[in-house]
Image (cartoon, grey):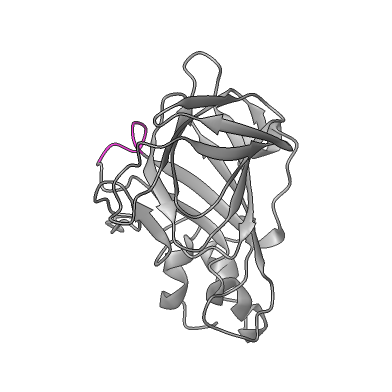
Amino acid sequence: MAFVDQMHFKLPPFGYWTLDDWKTKGPEYIEIQDNMLGWDVTDFGSGDFHKVGLLLFTLRNGNFNDPKYRKPYCERIIITEEEQILPSHTHYRKMEDIINRGGGNLMIELFGCNEDGSYSDQPITVTMDGQQVTAQPGEIVRLTPGQSITLVPGQYHKFWGEKGTGKILIGEVSTVGDDRVDNRFYEATGRLPDIVEDEKPKYLLFKDYPSIATL
């Protein structure tokens, strides 16, 4: 939260709700639960969050399965530390813009995807701020603050913060996102971790919402 504030980005009110705040909320807030808005943290099963991990906040989202939610788009922010890896993955349905909103430099490794899920040995074409760029298999592109890249389904991407440049506030603008069903990781990984609740949570993750009876 301190870093987001430092980057002059403001979260919606529910980003700051405590567990006690959530217990006062009624069914008028059900869209937050249904569309997986709010905090999300994962170490992808690595056991070492600072080496392989991600911290996200979903501000708005549609829904693959519920027609009453007509939003065809999703917006997130992501915080990535220096050399903290998001493992290589692609999406079955989601098209996204990854935007460096400020901080350090974001490094992105690119591959195409064969039908069997393996890496393609063919170049792929991506768009970077309106410019078509052809990347060779495994090529690494750098996004400095303000730059962005557009990725379509079938384009594997792995990213991390460049060493020595500082942590990064990343923006993601995409079609509807559902990380429970729409991710295809190159190597097996755990997307939604099991958490040992050894103390009362200060803020909730989106996967905690079903345990709150008030919504």
Looking at the picture, does residue 73 appear above or below residue 3? below
Is 50 inside the magenta-drawn segment?
yes
Q: Residue at x 54, y 67 (%)?
A: 20
Q: On the image, which quarter does residue 126 sit in? A: top right
Magenta stretch, residue numbers? 47-52
**Where is residue 189 shown, x and y percent of the image?**
27, 50
Is 80 inside the magenta-drawn segment?
no
Q: Residue at x 29, y 55 (%)?
A: 198
**Where is residue 101 shown, x and y percent of the image?**
68, 35
**Where is residue 72 shown, x and y percent of the image?**
67, 69
Give the prevailing secondary structure in the magenta stretch.
Answer: loop
Where, quadrant-wise, is the N terminus in this rendering?
A: top right
Q: Is residue 86 left or right of residue 97?
A: left
Q: Residue furthest top?
A: 164
Task: Using the image as rendered, state which of residue 15 and residue 21 is in the foreground.
Answer: 15
Looking at the picture, does residue 134 appear above or below residue 22? above
**Where is residue 74 shown, x and y percent of the image?**
63, 61
